[in-house]
Image: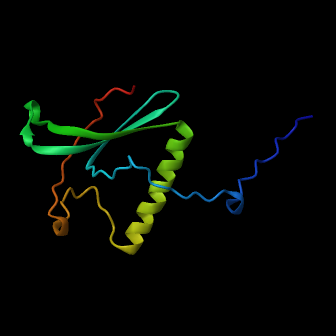
Amino acid sequence: MTTRKKPVKPVQKQNAPRINFEKGDDHQIVYSNVIQVLHTPVDFQITFGLVDASIKRPENRAAVKAVASVMLSPIHARQLAELLMKNVAKYEDDYMKLDLKSKKAPEEEGGQYIDLDLSEQPNH
């Protein structure tokens, strides 16, 4: 006779505690236009950077100044990924579809599309 596992019930959202963020004295808001993600079996590191187009690097590589890094557990990294996808979908519904394949800068922002291939970076 085989035993079947009981299905796991999802956590009810109404039972989840509400979170209210209070900004501490050292809270900062930083702008980032490039992100690097590294991982190990036990954590993820997300580094936010700012491309400095005025500095020329050999082999056509952009100079990036790291402005902040965040360490996350794998489960929190998964939750962040899902939360970002949900919010990007809402943004696209509210404003405009984001097309990463066109590599065109958003004209209204006067932006510049910079294709940074970080795939050669080792996972740490």
Q: Is residue 7 left or right of residue 78?
A: right
Residue 15: x and y in percent read 72, 59
Please give the count of numbered marks on the rendered protein. 0
From what the image shows, is residue 9 above or below residue 45?
below
Residue 23: x and y in percent read 44, 54
Q: Residue at x 8, y 39 (%)?
A: 55
Judge by depth and name the residue closer to the eye, 69 or 4.
69
User: Is residue 89 visible in the rendered structure shown here?
Assistant: yes
From what the image shows, is residue 105 above or below residue 96?
above
User: Is residue 47 visible in the rendered structure shown here?
Assistant: no
Q: Is residue 61 left or right of residue 15?
A: left
Q: Residue at x 88, y 35 (%)?
A: 2
Q: Is residue 55 left or right of residue 22?
A: left
Q: Is residue 9 left or right of residue 2?
A: left
Which residue, as the protein is rendered here, is positioned at the far front? 25
Which residue, as the protein is rendered here, is positioned at the far right? 1
Q: Residue at x 27, y 49 (%)?
A: 32
